[in-house]
Every structure is written in C-alpha cells, then in structure tokens.
Amino acid sequence: MSINFLITTLIVVLAPGTGVLYTLGAGLSHGKRASLLAALGCTLGIVPHLAAALLGLAAVLHASALAFQSIKIAGVGYLLLMAWQTLKDNGSFALDAAGTRRSPARIITSGILLNILNPKLSIFFFAFLPQFVTGDEAAPLLRISELGGIFMAVTLVVFIGYGLFAAQLRRFVIGRTTVIAWMRRTFAASFVALGVKLALAER
C-alpha cells in the first residue's frame, strides 16, 4: 500500500464535509454513543459509491448529465431538510444528559443517506482509487476493493475521533440555552452552505 494513498486519504477524510458535520452534531447533541453510530452510518454510506465505481456506474454518472443532476438534486434537498430539522426541531438538537432522544436506526440511516446522496463521491472513487492501481495488477478490481476498504476504515476511525471530541464538549454547553441556539443556527447554516456547494458542483 502506497504511503501517498494513505496521506491523500487522510487529507480527504479530515476535510470538513457533510459526514464530519453530521458526526460532530450527533456527538454534541446526543453524546458518545450517538457519535459512534453517526460515524458508522457515514462510513456505510460509502459502500454504494465504491460498488458503483467497481461496476462502472460512476462512469455513467460522469457521462450522463441527467443521472448526475437527479442525484445531486436529491442530495441538495436532503441537506436542506437536515438544515430545517436542525434549526426548527429543538428536540432533535437538544443537549440532554441522557443523550437518547434519537433512535440508533435513525442516526445510522441519516448518516448513510447523507453520503449516498452525494454523486461527487462516486466520481471521486472512480477517479481516485484507480490512480493507485498499477497497470500490471493481476486483479485490479480486487485491488480497488482493498483500497476502498482502507478508505472506509480510515473514515470510520477519523469520524469516531471527531464524534468523541464533540461528545466531550457536551458538558460545557448542556443547559446553556443561548449556546445551544447558536449551535443549531451554525449547524443549519453549514448544511445550507454544503447544499449550495453541491448544487453548484459540476460533473
């Protein structure tokens, strides 16, 4: 495995995005357990994109404006929905001591959907992973699968780190209604910004 692959993967995973934002929000809102579930959900959301790259579907997304735009619109819509829910639903972002307001299934599903509804991730895998497969590779698809698995493992570890860090900060903001209100607004605005960024993305 190339050290360049690991470095590039770390840079990509560490960069703030929808998954990082969602995991931080889960840790701050509902504690350590929720942050771990959010990290797992975001990581599982990578699987369809890796499968798409392996099956060549990423090439279809890249070539077909309609397919790309359809998934992109769905992704933008979901990000805006997340922003609205974060801003308006006090219960979903309330920092309670028990941290059990959202079900595990809902936390994981939201994380999966956030990553599934991002067409750029499929194209990223299609363009990124093959760069680290040599021309004389005996089983290139297997090699890409291995690299994809490593990418997912790094994602899970990094997101868990983000989530646990956020969970540790909960004790400093629990009960501070002004801080919680500003946190909701900040996270909602961030989801909107990411939605706008995705809306403006080109193939």
Image (cartoon, rainbow, N blue to C red):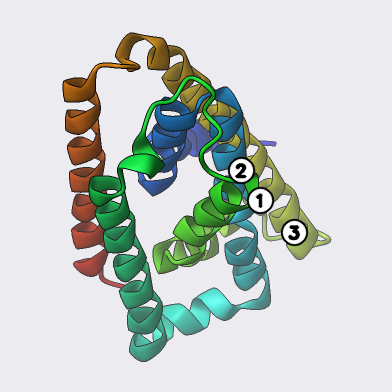
Q: Is mark 2 on a helix, strand or loop?
A: helix
Q: From this viewpoint, which residue is outermost toward the top?
A: 172
* Residue drawn at (56%, 38%) of the image: 39
In the picture, measured across the screen, residue 20 lies left or right of residue 136, that is left
Which residue position is annotated with label 2? 151
Residue 27, placed above or below residue 145: above
Quarter where residue 67 is shown: bottom left
Which residue position is annotated with label 3? 136
x, y percent for residue 164:
52, 20
Which residue position is annotated with label 1? 148
Q: What's the distance in space between the residues labelled 3 and 1, CA to CA?
A: 19 Å
Question: Residue 100 bears which disc, if any?
Answer: none
Q: What residue type is labelled 3?
A: Asp
> Do tag 2 and tag 1 residues touch (Cβ < 8 Å)?
yes
Q: Which amino acid does label 2 sit on?
A: Phe
For the N terminus, the quadrant is: top right
Q: Is residue 16 visible?
A: no
Q: Neighbour class for label 1 at 10 Å: few (<14), some, many (≥20)?
A: many
Q: What's the distance in space between the residues labelled 2 and 1, CA to CA?
A: 5 Å
Q: Is residue 15 visible?
A: yes
